[in-house]
Amino acid sequence: MPPMDNIFTLDTLDEKSIIVRYLITSPLDPDSAMMKLCKEQSLSHALGNDIGLIEKFLAKYLPNSITKINNKQFLVDIVFPWHNIENSLSMLLSAAGGDTFNIKDLYPIKIVSIKLPQAFIKN
């Protein structure tokens, strides 16, 4: 089983990548904050401990996208799995913004941009 912190990062994108850029304010370091955000916005506690399901549905962050604004703010890109969104704009908005206001130590969280793949736009 891979170390849990490694499953939260993504190094390469595919043609179906749905990318949401966030502006995060947090006392946590960016990696810890991103693990928390990715888990909450894609899994919460719904999948238990099945690592296969977790890896399939987990939103992941692009470590190279982290841009520090100051010691408590940074920008980051999160990639949501295509199958989590089901080609639905309402599912996307729910996944991207849903429960962000209730995540301890991550406040405020702002969505800066959303990049949709061509397949999403086409449908």
Image: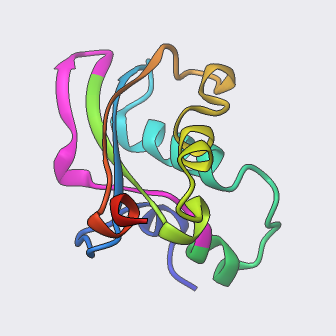
Whether residue 72 appears in magenta in the rendering, the answer is yes
Taking the spot 55% from the left edge, 32% from the top edge, the residue there is 97
Q: Image check: 10 left or right of 99? A: left
Quick one: which residue is furthest to the front in this view? 123
Q: Image check: 18 left or right of 94? A: left
Q: Quadrant of residue 74?
A: top left
Q: Work out whether 94 lies above or below 70.
A: below
Taking the spot 18% from the left edge, 26% from the top edge, the residue there is 68
Q: Image check: 6 left or right of 2? A: left
| Quadrant where the N terminus is found in the figure | bottom right
Taking the spot 55% from the left edge, 38% from the top edge, the residue there is 93
Whether residue 26 appears in magenta in the rendering, the answer is no
Q: Quadrant of residue 117?
A: bottom left
Q: Quadrant of residue 51?
A: bottom right
How far across and down, in percent of the image, does residue 88 sit? 57, 54
In magenta, the rendered stretch is 57-73
How far across and down, in percent of the image, does residue 17 sit? 34, 65
